[in-house]
Amino acid sequence: MTSEKKISIQTWCAVGLLISGFGLACAGFCVPPVGEISDSVLMYIAEAFTMAGTCFGIMAYVNGRLAKITKTTPADETE
């Protein structure tokens, strides 16, 4: 699997988790009892948002580290 495909899968997974979290939050207000969200829905929303944040955070960290590594040359390290 190529690096670009992994990043694409990771991004779509995070976006899907965000969409499902927002969708479930909206649906939680519409089902009886109206205006009250169940504890299990809140747990799912928290876990989905945490996982999505982790996916985006790891991707940003790896991209930043790779950018530093590719810019560093042996001549730069001796100075």
Image (spheres, rainbow, N blue to C red):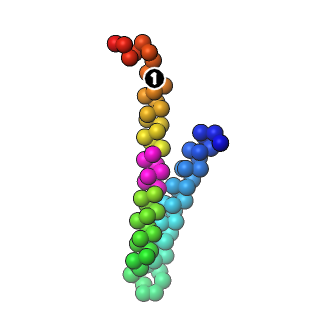
Q: Quadrant of residue 79?
A: top left
Query: Residue 48: where, in percent of width, then height?
Result: 46, 63
- What is the tally of numbered marks visible in this picture? 1
Task: Say whether residue 16 is magenta.
Answer: no
At x 46%, y 57%, the residue is 51
Query: Residue 29: where, in percent of width, then height?
Result: 43, 78
> In the rendered view, would you say 55 is above or below 70?
below
At x 49%, y 71%, the residue is 24
Magenta-highlighted stretch: main secondary structure?
helix
Outermost residue toward the right?
Answer: 1
Q: Amino acid at mark 1?
A: Lys
> In the rendered view, would you say 22 is above or below 29?
above
Say what secondary structure mark 1 lies in. helix
Determine whether, in the image, residue 39 is placed left or right of residue 5.
left
Query: Residue 55: where, in percent of width, then height?
Result: 48, 51
Q: Dot 1, crowdedness within 10 Å: few (<14), some or many (≥20)?
A: few
At x 57%, y 53%, the residue is 12
Determine whether, in the image, residue 18 is placed left or right of residue 2.
left
Outermost residue toward the bottom?
Answer: 33
Instruction: Write down the region rendered in magenta.
Output: 52-58
Outermost residue toward the left?
Answer: 79
At x 63%, y 39%, the residue is 2
Query: Residue 50: where, in percent of width, then height?
Result: 42, 59
| Quarter of the image where the N terminus is located | top right
Which residue matches tag 1?
Answer: 71
